[in-house]
Amino acid sequence: MSTPSTPTIVDDTDTGRLDGASRLRIFSVLAVIVLFTEVAPLQYTMIAAALQKIAPSFPQVGANITWAIIVFGLVGAAASPLVGKISDVWGKKRTFLLCGLIFLIGCVIDATTNNWGMFLFGRALQAIAIATQVVAYGLIRDLLPRKYVPLGLGVTATGLGFSALLAPIVGGWLLEHHSYHAIFWFLAAFMLVMTPFVIVVVPESKLRVKESVDIVGAALLAAGVTLTLIYLDKGQDWGWSKLGTLVWLFGGLALLVVFVVVENIVSTPIMDMKLLFTPRVGMVLVLALFASFIIGIQGYATGYMTQTPDAANIKATIVDQAQAGVAAMTGHPIPASMIRVTLDPEFTYGSGFSLLQYAWHIAVATALAAMIVGAIGGALTRRTGARLPLIVGLLIFTAIGAIYAVAPYSVPSYLLLGIAFGTALGLYYATAPNLIVEAVPQEQQGISVGMLGVMNSMGTAIGLAVVTAFVNSNPVQATVEVMGTKRTVPVPSVFGDHGYALGYWFAAGGSAVALVFALVMRHGRTPATGGTAH
């Protein structure tokens, strides 16, 4: 058995930090880094909100259309630690640009395919964009003067407003005037525009760690997470307790156990298990997993529910279809009054928004709140420490999860809840990376923030998988009665209130667990130092 080796560090005293640079130079570097990383929230805002409109292009998948988001989080979770380690070994700027290239290829695939399998493959390649944020945290810690690091991490986590302002609006306009393929062409163009700015403006970090990259560990982690999430997503369809279903869960958990064992015995693990299980790191990572449930659920459910037509419009559409069917068979039209439609279960949500309408009514306000509060959260972290603003954010997460589950649906209430969610999101994303940066030495920066990326991505994917299972178990069916003859048919892509309510209760529960960890955590009670306190 070999023991993990101590990393060999190159240029550990000089990382290329811009201590003598002007503010214009410093903030130009920060702005380019942040805008490049905004491709991940940019695509998430566009695609998650557009799922209700994309779904008709893949009618065979039903509620499993959420795998367009789940696969993004799944691959992102597996890739983040590997990319984090690669950035420590090969160079952060170089890895940054490589992630952008892979994302670009994925966008081109989805912009040119109508095949569900190829579409998911393209989404999997795009998931590498999640890892750009992992690399960005390392670049900011290595390049920015220490006093700007907490603020830089907070701004990086929530963006400069591009995704907040333009993603829902541009995505909505593109979807209204073109097919969903246009969204992916836009994302590809965004990456093409930003890449030269990174090449010219952002210097390379001089920090290097001389290690090999643990490909076996990355493969075990990816396989374990994948099998576990498939169980969560398909358990409702296959039967949670059936042996054939449990094989996926047990197989996934077994691979994750093997992953931990392997990481403890290889000489250059992708994850330092000793570091992983220290309270300063381990508690933040567990907290991140549970806190991310609501991030996955809210982003999907709010967009899907508001873009679903209300019950009255669905009934009217079914009546029109029934009239057309009768006329085609008999040659004689019948009045609408002779057709009765009942929905089971009845549902109370639905505004029939286009994606653009959803953007103007809810999404822009949510994202702006996250952007503004993220910058404030980063500044507070430098003054008070990260723990207090994190606790406030998790309190809000818990409260709004419960409110979403019980409050009557209306656009004004969802707008207010969306702003509250954005506030909590900004506080969470500003504080969590700062807690990790404060907890680890610089040579563990990339991999440690990669661990945080794993937990955020896994939590988001688990939230989506669970809410998908809940809504799949609550499909809406229509009973159509025409002149005494009844027929029951499914209403495509429409689900009962109860499924969404269960999803939000699950989100609230996860946030409450994360809150408990934050309350007992000793870490983050002193002002952030930019990574000097170890």
Image (tube, rainbow, N blue to C red):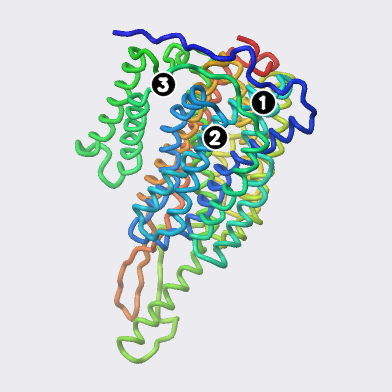
Q: Position of residue 78 (x, y in %)?
A: 41, 32
Which tag, 1 or 3, sits closer to the chain's start? 3
**SS at badge 2:** helix
Q: Quadrant of residue 220?
A: top left
Q: Find residue 96 and name its label.
A: 2
Q: Point out the image quarter for the N terminus.
A: top left
Mark 2 in CB contact with mark 3 (< 8 angstroms): no
Disc 3: CA contacts within 10 A as few (<14), some (14-19) or many (>=20):
many
According to the image, label 1 marks what residue? 389
Nearer mark to the viewer, of 2 and 1: 2
Mark 2 in CB contact with mark 1 (< 8 angstroms): no
Is there any visible trace of residue 495 in the rendered image?
Answer: yes
User: In the image, what residue occupies the spot 45% across and 27% down?
Assistant: 81
Q: What is the spatial separation of the Cα atoms under label 1 and label 3, in whole angstroms? A: 31 Å
What's under tag 3, amino acid-wise?
A: Ile
According to the image, label 3 marks what residue? 270
User: In the image, what residue occupies the spot 48% across and 36% down?
Assistant: 293
What's under tag 1, amino acid-wise?
A: Pro
User: In the image, what residue occupies the spot 39% across and 16% down?
Assistant: 268
Q: What is the spatial separation of the Cα atoms under label 2 and label 1, in whole angstroms? A: 29 Å
Q: Quadrant of residue 533?
A: top right
Is there any visible trace of residue 344 in the rendered image?
Answer: no
